[in-house]
Structure formats: structure tokens, C-alpha cells
Image (spheres, rainbow, N blue to C red):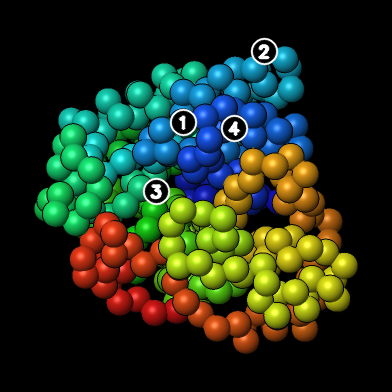
Amino acid sequence: MESVTLNTGATMPALGFGTSPSEVGLSAKSVVAAVKAGFRHIDCARCYGNEKEIGFGLKKLFEEGVVKREDLFITSKLWCNDQAPEDVPKAFKSSLDDLQIDHLDLYLIHWPFCVKKGSVWTPENIKPTDMASTWSAMEKLYHCGKTHAIGVSNFSSKKLEELFPVALVPPAVNQVECHPGWQQRKLQSFCDDKGIHLSGYAPLGSHGSHWGNKTDILKNPIVTSVAEESGKTPAQVCLRWGLQMGHSVIVKSVTEARIIENFDIFNWFLPDHLVAMFSEIGQKRLLMGDFLLKPHEQLWDEESN
């Protein structure tokens, strides 16, 4: 499997398995199927509400000898109502306890805003963010060895710039929406210059998800044309494109056949003329975030592609 080296020196598998909410019982089952298919990077989050279930899946894999803990790269994320510095270690420990592991490989701040404790994530519950204090608490987790890297998610270039002056440990990763229909060229260039790895969620677009604009990237004529010429599926060429652009990609499925298909993106490459075709795809952000923050331009700082 291909991997990327983070600015901490840690090695992260370039293909990750996403665990955003599924029907009860499917999260553990799909994680077990993914690891058996070859996935070694499991991407979790506190707000998904399924880390306890995933923990049972991980325990099963360890007990059956399928993998050892050190074989896996496990990520989790700090939710918006746990950003107070005193809440960060508590939320972190809750994730460890539910996942039944003793450390994380990567811990991310899920969103660059904070919501009132005990409230739902709606615009009226947004409160001022003290990112300096939150990041300092994240750094303490890193320094004590409980997580091997720390980073952020859904941060614009501007929000990263605001973090740098207070960060003694720079973020290792910025996980953002990234796929052929929203290629994040400017943000990736910025992250590359700063030594931050850009990791892409929703690498197949938002098809089948409960969020975002419903644009089926897998049916885009350019994607289907590249797939046909390559003898691969549209999903495989989207994932392969992401790797060749230098991203890591976090892909989710609960169907075993698709999990196996999504893992089959190694030992072959898209030739340059096919990669170039992706630049012709129209660009549109799928996750606007207006259900989180109004106006949504405050979230993304009007960052274009």
C-alpha cells in the first residue's frame, strides 16, 4: 500500500477507510471487512456516534489475529462542543475507551468553530472559538505520546494562517472535502508550502450521503471516459486520481464488494493524458456548511478552487 510521511515523521497509509454514520451494526461489520480487504487506515470521529461499535470490530480483529494494533493507523476527531481546553483530554479519552485502544495515530479538530456545550450543531449555537487554547490542549496530547500526530479538518488557508502563530506543534494534516469535482488546488498548494498533508474526504463526491449537494461525480462524463479507457471503475479512477495528486483519500462503503473494489487502486497508474482530463471537470463544493454556519462564507473564507 502507498503511504505518506507526515511532518512528525509518522507514516500514514494513503488510503483510509471512512466510518461516518451507518445503520446500527454496519460500522463494526464494515471495518472488519475493510481490514480484511487490506485497509490499514481507519478514520473515525466522536460525532459519528459509532466509535464504541467500531471498538468491538477492532477487538474482534485483534483477538482473531487478523492484525495487531501496530498494523493499523487510527484517526479520530475532536467535536465542536468539546473544544474547551479542559474538555479536550476528556473527549480524547472517551474516544480511546470506546475504540478499546491505548493511543491514536492522528487526532484532528473536526471543524474550525465551537458550539455551546450540550447543544446541537446549528448556527444559533455557535460561540466564539479560542483556537489557541484548544490547540494547546491538542499539543499536550501529542507531547505525552497519546497521539502520534495532531491536525485539523475543514480549515481554510486563512484559518490555518491564524493557527500558525500560536502553534508550537504545526498541524500534520488538514482533512477536507476533495474529489474531482472539488479539487482544492489552491488549498493543497498552500498546505504543501507549509508542510501540511492534505487528506481528502468524500473522494467519490456526496453520492449516497445525507449531506451536501447531490452531485454524482461517478457519472461525470470525463470520469466515466477515463474509467472506460483505463479498464477500471469510476470509483477506482477517482481514488487513483486523488493519490496521484498527492492527497490521501478517505473512502467509505458498507458493501463488501465495493470495499474490495475501492482497495484495488494500487499497482497501476493513470497516464498523464488521462490525469490531465480531470482539470476539465467543473468545480463545485458539495458541503457548503450553511447548516453549520451562516453565512457559510465565514466557514470557508470564500476560498475558491
Residue 272 in percent (x, y) is at 76, 79
- The answer to whether marks 2 and 3 mark residues whose Cβ atoms lie closer than 8 Å is no
Residue at which label 4 appears: 26
Q: Earlier in the sequence, mark 4 or mark 2?
A: 4
Dot 1 lies on which element? loop
Q: Which mark is residue 50?
A: 1
- The answer to whether marks 4 and 1 mark residues whose Cβ atoms lie closer than 8 Å is no
Dot 4 lies on which element? helix
Front tag of 3 and 4: 4
Report, in whole angstroms, how far the alpha carbon at label 1 lies from the one at label 3.
Answer: 21 Å
The residue at the point 25 percent across, 48 percent down is: 121
Q: Earlier in the sequence, mark 3 or mark 4?
A: 4
Residue at which label 2 appears: 63
Report, in whole angstroms, how far the alpha carbon at label 4 lies from the one at label 1.
Answer: 10 Å
Residue 101 in percent (x, y) is at 50, 21
Q: Is residue 68 left or right of residue 182?
A: right
Q: Earlier in the sequence, mark 1 or mark 3?
A: 1
Residue 271 visible within the image = yes
Q: Amino acid at mark 1?
A: Asn
Residue at which label 3 appears: 151
